[in-house]
Image (cartoon, rainbow, N blue to C red):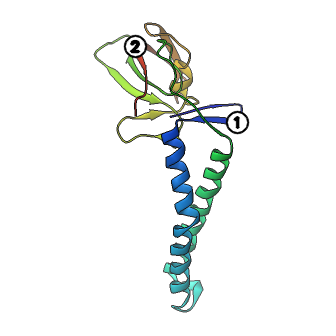
Amino acid sequence: MTQTSDNVTWLTQEAYDQLKAELEYLSGPARIEISKKIEAAREEGDLRENGGYHAAKEEQGKQELRVRQLEQLLENAKVGEAPEDTGVVAPGMVVTIAFDGDEDDTVTFLLASREYASTEIETYSPQSPLGSGVNGKKVGTEAEYELPNGKMASVKILEAKPYQG
């Protein structure tokens, strides 16, 4: 899980280790693999009409962008603990909300940076409209956030528990 404030990103040890491993792979073995793909495509001839070459170069560009993102994220990272179970919504918590007070229409999500999105549970950034609307609110209270069309939506916070990963 992550929590971002003033250019510092707080990560659990698990999240830090995962991102560090991804960086090591992308800046080592993955770079070698992509350079081999580019070299093989280059040997096919005319580069202006070589789809494989252009695809490999585009893949290389995306990979290098991800390397820079990870380097910046990890450079500003601080490893910390999960938030305390205080009943107040904060990054690193699993939050259950009900839309417009209808407790049958609920959504549960992890409030965390997209860098630590989980396949187990949907993740909302604390900077997203819904994330910023519920962040800092107590369980049992109402929160409002702005929809993409400019209208306001209301949710009731039913539960907020620290993410256990």
Residue 81's disc number:
none
Percent coordinates x, y for residue 127 in the rendering = 59, 30
User: Which residue is at the far right?
Assistant: 6
Q: Is the residue marked by circle 2 packed among few (<14), some (14-19), or many (20+) residues within 10 Å?
A: some
Q: Secondary structure at mark 1?
A: loop
Residue 84, compared with residue 53, is above or below; it is above
Per the model, the C-alpha gap separating discs 2 and 1 is 34 Å
Q: Label 2: which residue? A: 100
* Left or right of residue 118: residue 47: right
Q: Is the residue marked by circle 1 packed among few (<14), some (14-19), or many (20+) residues within 10 Å?
A: few
Residue 7's disc number:
1
Percent coordinates x, y for residue 30 in the rendering = 52, 68
Residue 90, compared with residue 137, is above or below; it is below
Percent coordinates x, y for residue 72 in the rendering = 67, 48
User: Which residue is at the far top?
Assistant: 140
User: Which residue is at the far left?
Assistant: 104
Going by the numbered disc 1, the residue's amino acid type is Asn
Percent coordinates x, y for residue 121 in the rendering = 37, 35
Q: Secondary structure at mark 2?
A: loop
Image quarter hosting the C terminus: top left
| Label 2 or label 1, whichever comes before in sequence order | 1
Residue 102, compared with residue 77, is above or below; it is above
Residue at position x 57%, y 90% in the image: 46
Residue at position x 34%, y 38% in the image: 120
Residue at position x 51%, y 91% in the image: 44
